[in-house]
């Protein structure tokens, strides 16, 4: 009985401690240190603020904040050197073996971690075509091909962290213009458009470096001649690319990356209609047409 009374007495003496805490019990603030030098409602001085932000705990929390940041906007600009290889069964005009400068502009906006929309515009300054029958033809044909892709992406991130590996599926609209700058009466200028279905994979070696890979299939529902020569085409195509990227700056919410790699775009189609001489192209045996663009590119990406 005495032991029971003693326990009750001890509990009654402990209860006021929790019921009426002392004023110093809960005086912590986001910048309060263990020695309680800073008071509630009083901003720290410059010296005190410097001590706070240099605290290892604060530094670690700041790094984790950037690590899990959702960088929603990606702006990509770059240059490339592009070569065209063109093959037709009549061998009237083919692409010459030369590299031409190319400009690349792309933007992506991630609505959520897994859903994004974007667009890519690529334009070659010009490419030279020549005659396979006469490689020394004095008047080559110049073209200025360009591409425009508008798409939606569905992304799965393995770690849900900035810079982590991911896979993405893409679906959108692909278009390709083939304007002829000289001698349009001897070679057709075309416009192709269709559906682009592809996949991307980022293999991150770390938060700073990795590989980007992509493979797209093109279904060209409309690939037609828009010159005076009457030809229509439908066909298929593909795109693939691989590049190595590295981070050059990551501070104040802006992450800048640089990439270098190789890409290729190819079209395969069937021709039908009238040829340059007015004869039926099938009669000339011209029923197959191929274009392959290869490029070496250097791009800069700003992620915000």
Image (spheres, grey):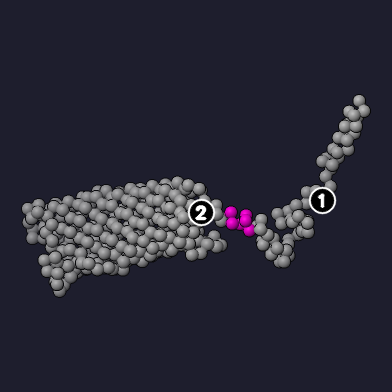
Q: Position of residue 263 (x, y in %)?
A: 32, 59
* Residue 186 visible here: no
**Gap between marks 1 and 2 measured at Cα:** 41 Å
* Residue 284 visible here: yes
Instruction: Name the one closer to the observer, 102 or 62.
Output: 62
- Quadrant for residue 241, please give it: bottom left
Element under disc 2: loop
| 271 shown above or below 125 | above
**Other-residue count near label 1 (Cα within 10 Å), few / some / many at <14 / 14–19 / ≥20:** few
User: Who comes first in sequence, dot 1 or dot 2?
Assistant: 1
Instruction: Name the one closer to the observer, 120 or 290.
Output: 290
Q: Residue at x 89, y 28 (%)?
A: 4
Q: Position of residue 196 (x, y in %)?
A: 32, 50
Q: Position of residue 295 (x, y in %)?
A: 31, 62
Residue of label 2 = 162
**Seen in the image, is 224 located left or right of residue 28?**
left
**Are the two marked residues, 1 and 2, in contact with CB atoms closer than 8 angstroms?**
no
| 118 shown above or below 48 | above
Magenta span contains residue 121: no
Q: Residue at x 48, y 47 (%)?
A: 158
Residue at the right extreme of this rendering: 2
**Seen in the image, is 300 located left or right of residue 294?**
right
Q: Residue at x 59, y 57 (%)?
A: 63
**Seen in the image, is 42 located left or right of residue 1?**
left
Residue range in magenta is: 59-64
Q: Position of residue 198 (x, y in %)?
A: 34, 49
Magenta stretch mostly in which secondary structure?
Answer: helix
Residue 24 is labelled as: 1
Residue at the top extreme of this rendering: 1
Closer to the observer: label 1 or label 2?
A: 2
């Amino acid at each position: 009985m005495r032991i029971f009374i003693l326990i009750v007495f001890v509990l009654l003496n402990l209860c006021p401690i929790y019921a009426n805490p002392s004023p110093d019990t809960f005086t912590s603030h986001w910048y309060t240190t263990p020695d309680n030098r800073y008071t509630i409602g009083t901003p720290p001085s410059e010296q005190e603020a410097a001590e706070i932000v240099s605290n290892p705990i604060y530094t670690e929390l700041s790094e984790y904040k950037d690590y899990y940041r959702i960088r929603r906007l990606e702006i990509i600009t770059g240059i490339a050197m592009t070569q065209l290889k063109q093959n037709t069964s009549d061998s009237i005009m083919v692409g010459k073996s030369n590299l031409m400068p190319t400009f690349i502009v792309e933007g992506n906006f991630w609505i959520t971690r897994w859903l994004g929309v974007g667009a890519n515009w690529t334009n070659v300054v010009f490419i030279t075509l020549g005659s396979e029958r006469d490689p020394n033809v004095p008047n080559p044909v110049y073209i200025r091909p360009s591409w425009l892709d508008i798409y939606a992406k569905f992304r799965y991130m393995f770690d849900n962290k900035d810079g982590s590996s991911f896979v993405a599926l893409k679906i959108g609209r692909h278009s390709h213009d083939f304007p002829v700058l000289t001698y349009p009466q001897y070679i057709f200028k075309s416009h192709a458009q269709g559906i682009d279905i592809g996949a991307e994979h980022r293999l991150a070696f770390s938060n700073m470096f990795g590989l980007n890979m992509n493979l797209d299939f093109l279904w060209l529902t409309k690939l037609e001649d828009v010159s005076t020569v009457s030809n229509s085409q439908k066909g298929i195509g593909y795109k693939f690319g691989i590049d190595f990227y590295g981070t050059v700056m990551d501070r104040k919410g802006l992450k800048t990356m640089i990439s270098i790699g190789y890409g290729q775009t190819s079209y395969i189609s069937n021709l039908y209609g009238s040829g340059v001489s007015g004869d039926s192209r099938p009669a000339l045996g011209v029923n197959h047409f191929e274009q392959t663009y290869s490029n070496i590119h250097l791009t800069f990406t700003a992620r915000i």
